[in-house]
Image: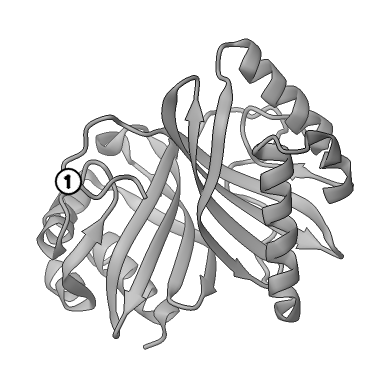
Amino acid sequence: MSPKELVIALFTAAFADHDPEAARQLVTPDYIQHNPQIPTGAEGLVGLIPLVAQSGMTATTHRIITEGDLVVLHSTFNNADAFGAPTLAAFDIFRVEDGKVAEHWDNLQPVPDTTVSGRGMTDGATEITDLDKTEENKALVLGFVRDVLGGAAPEKAPMYSEVYMQHNPMLAEGIDGLMEGTKAWAEQGNVITKFEPQIVVAEGNFVFVASNATVSGKPWAFFDLWRVEDGKIVEHWDVVSPTPAEMVHGNGKF
């Protein structure tokens, strides 16, 4: 199976079929887990599956982005009260090695009833195009992350985007909405002093970046997905959460 096919099979086994043994066959015995609440190793994942089944939680995957041995799923979890909220938006990253899933990272965020932009956290464009522009689009997005989100040159924001469809529930449309929202967040005491990409996965017009951030002295994880069109960023989704100080394993968030 390709990395994409392998990850889909694992996700199906865990969240649709609720089949622990099928899942066990798809991961390495020393499967590395970065979710702060799930023990590392294959048995940590296998032990989670009966809890998923009992909770009635369901998963809907909206986008799959693949590059090399990395696969990113952008999903919605419903009936997820046992895991923190009735509905969760999620990014899951899987690394494949020698025909098995070897490592997993994720970020989860409750989905609110309303959003500032009127867009949902997971709706919007899904079609992957412009495969020949993958590297060009990746460079564009990483420049935007460095200059705008990382603060190296925020005045360059307009050069990266003319239309910026926003799916972050707290931000208004457009680059102006992003900048105004970031300023308002800082005025509430949430000052970003570090924003460092850790994982980048690009496929055609979609570029995903998982970043390790520091917000007012505390660690946060920002998982962002951008869609690029004609050399400009046109759409953005994210899942943002504070990183807990204590985890059930020693692997860290990243």
Image x and y of residue 188, in percent: 59, 11
Numbered disc total: 1
Q: Quadrant of the N terminus?
A: bottom left
Residue 156 is situated, as x and y percent measured from the top left of the image, at 84, 41
What secondary structure is found at the residue carrying circle 1? loop
| Viewer-nearest residue: 8 or 234 | 234
Q: Which amino acid is tagged 1?
A: His
Which residue is at the far top?
188
- The image quarter in which residue 21 lies: bottom left
Q: Could you tell me if residue 15 is visible in this image?
A: yes
The residue depicted at 71 percent of the width and 67 percent of the height is: 205
- Regarding residue 19, the answer to whether it shows in the image is no
Q: Quadrant of residue 134?
A: bottom right
Tell me what residue is drawn at x 73 percent, y 32 percent.
117
Nearest to the observer: residue 52 or residue 135: 135
Q: Residue at x 72, y 38 (%)?
A: 152
| Above or below, comparing residue 250 to residue 50 in the picture | above
Task: Pinpoint residue 198: horizontal percent, then vertical percent.
Answer: 48, 53
Mark 1 crowdedness (10 Å alpha carbons): few <14, some 14-19, many ≥20: some
Give the answer, above or below, for where 220 lies relative to 122.
above
Residue occupied by mark 1: 249
Colouring of the image? one colour
Nearer-the-camera pick, 17 or 143: 143
